[in-house]
Image: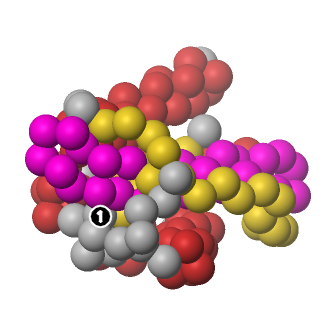
Amino acid sequence: MRGKKMKRVKQFVVVMIGLIWLSALMIGCGQSKLSDTFDEETIKEEAMRAIGYFNEKDYQGLIDMGSKELKESITVEELAKASDPYLDKCGTFKEITKTVVVGNKDSKTGNEYGGVVMIGKYEDGKIQFTIAFDQDMKLVQFLIK
């Protein structure tokens, strides 16, 4: 029974955050190199701050980093329900083992986004983070798998 519940929670996380990402970025976007509008180090630092909130289970802090759309689309309780199983399974955070910086541009609006894919090593596993920011450095995507 616990396995089914965990699977439903994981599916909820992927669907919920995936929908946010899809609606905010993927329609008309193409992944490419990071635009000059963004500073690569700032993107990495802000992504690490978001991962820090995640690791501390400070979901309000994570939501507070978000754009208006992100803040309106998920609650602390929903984020906790979706995220806690990953942290419970993987244990204590150790380090980031891989980082890839990417850029996106919405062809319909012209809005540019900067993001990273980071692999976090934990005591008992790994978590992949896909994190994106708008031009105001507001969090628009925080995907975990």
Q: Residues within 10 Å of mark 1 (few under 14, many from 20)?
A: many
Residue 124 counted in the magenta span: yes
Quadrant for the N terminus in the image: top right
- Asked which quadrant contains residue 7, the reply is top right
Residue visible at 70% across and 58% down in the picture? 99
Q: Is residue 48 above or below residue 5?
A: below
User: Residue placed at 18% from the left, 51% from the top?
Assistant: 110
The residue at the point 45 percent across, 53 percent down is 103
Residue 124: % across, % down: 86, 50
The answer to which of 111 and 19 lies nearer the viewer is: 111
- Residue located 24% across and 32% down the image: 28
Tally the marks: 1
Q: Residue furthest right?
A: 123
Give the percent coordinates (x, y) of residue 69: 15, 56
Residue 63 pos. (x, y %): 32, 67
State the quadrant of the C terminus: top right
> At which x and y percent is residue 66?
28, 67
Residue 76 is left or right of residue 7, and the answer is left
Up/down of 86 relative to 112, above or below: above
Amino acid residing under circle 1: Asp
Q: Toward the viewer: 132 or 112? A: 112
Span highlighted in magenta in the image = 104-131
Q: Which residue is mark 1?
A: 134
